[in-house]
Image (cartoon, grey):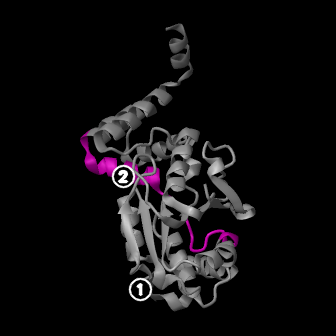
Amino acid sequence: MDAALTVMDELTTEDIEIRLLLEALYRRYHYDFRNYAQASIKRRLRQARQQLGVATFSALQDRLLHDPEAASRVVRLLTVQVSDFFRDPGYFRAIREKVVPHLKTYPSLKVWIAGCSAGEELHSFAILFREEGLEDRTLFYATDINQSALDAAAQGIYPISRLQAFTENHRLSGGRSSLSDYYTTGYGGAVFDKSLRERVVFSDHSLVTDAVFSEMHLISCRNVMIYFDRQLQDRALGLFSDSLIRNGFLGLGSKESLRFSARADDFVDFVKDEKIYQRRMA
């Protein structure tokens, strides 16, 4: 009892409120953020408090329990990710030059973009695979827990102001064409060709609670696990390991690693500097 009291004494009032809020969000709406990195969660929940005009996390909990629209806004804030087309061009160049030659040996391919957000990475892969002659044999799975993000990804519309960065990243990634070949502009937006999404399955999927996608040849999950604690990272990596074919490939974000994971032995380094790994044969 004394030990339990000591642990509770170490928690601030805010910490307790946040734990209760995340538990309420899970039990009421089945979104599980309980094992996300607390610093990131706290920062984003403070943004939610400000946007919803409530003074405490307890008041925010009360609001989301009784107002589904407020809960949706909180979930969107907790899951928002910032990305770019061909973000970290060296990663996509390594996919193009090192991974694609292996993928070309398969008659059909399945690629999972986990945590696809608004679709920048998905479209990057679709363009890369078209340029490398793999598009027609590939089925892409784009997943996220944020339905608004999935809807945006399915539309493929991005601000014109972002095109310069997108174009430069595409060039640095080894692009074999002009990025302008893939979009039209109008009304302040760039609309990417719907043909890029014809072989895409968009799906609501949680790395926290949902099961595997089987028989994937390539999984790209970048800058998602940095928001997870160690236990949740291990769960996600277990999903990826179980979803990949033997010798399949896994790409992570530049600040993510398998090094300390309980599932590290499932993989070997393939392009170490770009955090691309290969599933072991056994």
Who is closer to the viewer here, 250 or 68?
Answer: 250
Quarter of the figure that contains the C terminus: bottom right
Label total for image:
2
Q: Which residue reaches farthest top?
A: 2
Name the residue nearer the viewer: 66 or 103.
Answer: 103
The amino acid at mark 1 is Ser
Q: Quarter-wise, where is residue 139 in the image?
A: bottom left
Q: Secondary structure at mark 1?
A: helix
Q: Nearer the viewer, residue 195 or 101?
A: 101
Query: How far from the left and from the top, in percent, is residue 113?
Result: 49, 65
Give the residue drawn at x 53%, y 91%.
181
Instruction: Please provide the residue range marked out in magenta.
Output: 66-91
- Does residue 82 appear anywhere in the picture? no
| Residue at (55% x, 48% y) in the render | 227
Q: Residue at x 55, y 66 (%)?
A: 83
Residue marked by disc 2: 73
Query: Label 2 crowding class (10 Å Cα cut-off): few <14, some 14-19, many 20+?
Result: some
Q: Quadrant of residue 161?
A: bottom right
Q: Which residue is mark 1?
A: 195
Instruction: Please tell me whether residue 150 is drawn above or below residue 100 in the rendered image.
Output: above
* Dominant secondary structure of the residues highlighted in magenta in the image: helix
Specify the amino acid type for callout 2: Arg
Which is nearer the N-term, disc 1 or disc 2? Answer: 2
